[in-house]
């Protein structure tokens, strides 16, 4: 795409080429347009620089081979959760399997698929304005060279992070730093992933845990994760990871191959998915992040498939809620209970995994469990503090907070 005026007449413009934007482009291209037509799309991705995020890791669970199997760098058939006192819960979530995708490999895979679609164009530019117009919507953006572009389409899907979160009663931040490490001796069991290891120092409100995804006997991603009011400073992450790898895991000499870091809002805010007659939000900005866990990738796929199906039928492609109302209500209770310190976060999650099958817990965390399963799991939580929180929530005002 070049020129000052840009293009008109595209069926869809997707703003952002992260997990949400690329997934939506993939599903739209695979589904096709109304009456068997080929949809035309413009995918706007950030140019090289501070707006382009570094390499990230996305993890999720699914049954069998999925749509992105070529990009899966590792998977695990057994999962483990360790309580603060060292008690271990281990199980196979079959038929589900826990999988890891790296953003670079995902971008390459989707890029190759989109390159074979004649109706798809990719633009590298910084988006300045997204707005409705009489014929649909337009995106005003600027290239790295300073050229102004105006892109027009029937529908625009915006995946950019929000500058300000919607009002909420409870907001925590899931923040983490991870090391990809290589040890001198075999230290890891490749077939088992440590989903949550609570043998870490716990904050006063919230929780922390270690996270170990083995990539081989001597290679793994090791993360320190915390749910709390705000991210830590760099030195405090380093201190936490040194303590976890050396004192908790007992790893010997190791080399840090690369690092990753992130922060995910965990909030009971209501994220508007339609923000104009022809403008929609997707991904985390459209409420795809599960408030209780931070998992997003699987919900993005469900949301993208639903949008693509609606578009193929010629309907208004409003993104559906990524998580059921029942799951969002339970998450609101849990977040408030953690934020107030009414429940011990480490004991809360370790207890749930210890009393529920691994497969059922994963479906519960993904919002795919049945009502009776949710009730059974809810009865295994600290009933008194949770009921007090349920009674309190309707009385609490929603307040704004920056991401």
Image: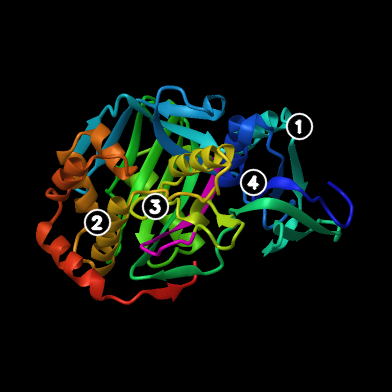
Instruction: Pick whichever, 30 or 159, lies toward us.
Output: 30
Q: In this view, does 162 lie to the left or right of 267?
A: right
- Mark 3 to mark 2 CA distance (whole Å): 13 Å
Q: Which of marks 3 and 4 is in front?
A: 4
Q: Residue furthest right?
A: 3
Numbered badge on residue 345: 2
Instruction: Pick whichever, 310 or 145, lies toward us.
Output: 310
Numbered badge on residue 175: none
Other-residue count near label 1 (Cα within 10 Å), few / some / many at <14 / 14–19 / ≥20 = few
**In this view of the protein, can residue 186 be seen by the observer?**
no
Q: Regarding mark 4 in the picture, which secondary structure is present there? A: loop
Start-end of magenta stretch: 257-272
Q: Regarding mark 1 in the picture, which secondary structure is present there? A: loop
Instruction: Pick whichever, 352 or 369, lies toward us.
Output: 369
Q: Where does the image place residue 339, in percent across and percent down from the top left?
A: 29, 66
**Badge 4 or badge 2: first in the primary sequence:** 4
Residue at horizontal 28 percent and vertical 57 percent from the top: 329
> According to the image, label 4 marks what residue?
17
Instruction: Indicate whether 103 appears above or below 167.
Output: above
- Mark 1 to mark 3 CA distance (whole Å): 42 Å
> According to the image, label 1 marks what residue?
118
Q: Where does the image place residue 164, in percent across and percent down from the top left?
A: 52, 69
């Amino acid at each position: 795409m070049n020129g000052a005026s840009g293009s008109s007449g595209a069926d869809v413009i997707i703003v952002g080429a992260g997990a949400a934007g690329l997934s939506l482009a993939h599903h739209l291209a695979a589904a096709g347009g109304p009456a068997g037509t080929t949809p035309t799309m413009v995918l706007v991705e950030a140019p090289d620089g501070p707006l382009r995020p570094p390499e990230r890791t996305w993890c999720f669970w699914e049954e069998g081979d999925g749509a992105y199997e070529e990009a899966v760098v590792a998977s695990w058939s057994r999962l483990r959760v360790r309580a603060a006192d060292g008690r271990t819960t281990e199980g196979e979530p079959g038929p589900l399997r826990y999988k890891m995708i790296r953003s670079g490999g995902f971008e390459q895979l989707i890029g190759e698929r989109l390159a074979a679609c004649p109706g798809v164009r990719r633009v590298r530019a910084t988006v300045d304005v997204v707005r409705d117009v009489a014929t649909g919507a337009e995106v005003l953006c600027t290239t790295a060279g300073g050229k102004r572009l105006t892109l027009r389409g029937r529908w625009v899907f915006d995946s950019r992070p929000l500058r300000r979160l919607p009002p909420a009663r409870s907001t925590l931040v899931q923040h983490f730093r991870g090391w990809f490490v290589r040890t001198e001796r075999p230290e890891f069991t490749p077939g088992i992933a440590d989903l949550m290891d609570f043998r870490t120092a716990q904050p006063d409100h919230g929780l922390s845990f270690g996270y170990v995804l083995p990539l081989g006997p001597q290679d793994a991603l090791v993360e320190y994760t915390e749910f709390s009011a705000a991210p830590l400073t760099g030195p405090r992450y380093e201190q936490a990871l040194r303590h976890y790898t050396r004192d908790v895991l007992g790893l010997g000499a190791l080399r840090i191959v690369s690092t990753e870091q992130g922060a995910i809002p965990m909030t009971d805010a209501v994220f508007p998915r339609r923000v104009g007659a022809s403008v929609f939000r997707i991904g985390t900005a459209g409420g795809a992040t599960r408030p209780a866990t931070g998992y997003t990738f699987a919900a993005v796929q469900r949301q993208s498939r639903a949008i693509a199906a609606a578009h193929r039928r010629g309907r208004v492609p409003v993104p559906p809620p990524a998580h059921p109302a029942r799951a969002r209500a339970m998450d609101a209770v849990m977040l408030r209970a953690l934020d107030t310190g009414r429940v011990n976060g480490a004991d809360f999650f370790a207890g749930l995994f210890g009393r529920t099958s691994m497969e059922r817990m994963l479906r519960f965390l993904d919002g795919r469990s049945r009502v009776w399963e949710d009730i059974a799991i809810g009865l295994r939580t600290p009933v008194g503090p949770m009921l007090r929180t349920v009674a309190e929530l309707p009385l609490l005002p929603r307040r704004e907070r920056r991401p």
